[in-house]
């Protein structure tokens, strides 16, 4: 979401825009706990990351 602020906007208007944006943001939510433990890795994630990074060199 993008909020466009015009030059000369009052402090009160900025605060109301911020409050409105925070209200909209708090409505949306993702329950990330339902994804916990769903991926079963066969290798150590840190060693996989190091291996993938070394492929670029």
Image: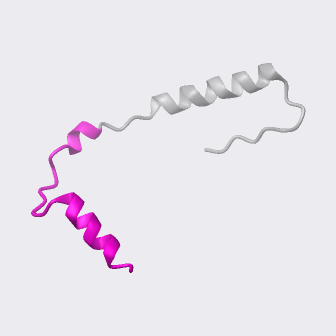
Question: Could you tell whether 17 is left or right of 31 in the image?
Answer: right
Quadrant, the C terminus: bottom left
Query: Which residue appears at 16% of the width and 50% of the height?
Result: 38
Which residue lies most toward the right here? 8
Magenta region includes residue 41: yes
Q: Is residue 57 above or below residue 40?
A: below
Q: Name the residue located 28 percent from the left edge and 67 percent from the top edge.
A: 50
Measured as percent of width and height from the top left, residue 21 is found at: 61, 31
Quadrant for the N terminus in the image: top right
> Foreground: 28 or 42?
42
- Name which residue lies at 85% across and 30% down: 9
- Up-down relation of residue 22 to residue 52 (above or below): above
Q: Which residues are magenta?
A: 32-57
Name, please, the residue furthest toward the top. Answer: 12
The quarter of the displayed image where residue 20 is located:
top right
Q: Position of residue 55 (x, y in %)?
A: 32, 79
Could you tell whether 8 is left or right of 4 in the image?
right
Closer-to-camera residue (35/50): 50
Query: So how many labels did they put on this image?
Result: 0
Residue 5 belongs to the span the image colors magenta: no
Give the image quarter of residue 8.
top right
The quarter holding residue 14 reads top right
- Rendered image coloring scheme: one colour
Residue 48 location in percent, x, y? 22, 66
Specify whether 31 is left or right of 28: left
- Tell me which residue sits at (52%, 33%) in the image: 25
Of residues 14 and 46, the one nearer the viewer is 46
């Amino acid at each position: 979401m993008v909020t466009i602020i015009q030059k000369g906007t009052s402090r009160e208007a900025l605060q109301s825009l911020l409050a409105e944006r925070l209200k909209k943001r708090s409505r949306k939510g993702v329950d990330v706990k339902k994804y916990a433990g769903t991926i079963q890795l066969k290798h150590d994630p840190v060693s996989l990351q190091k291996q993938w990074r070394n492929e670029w060199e």
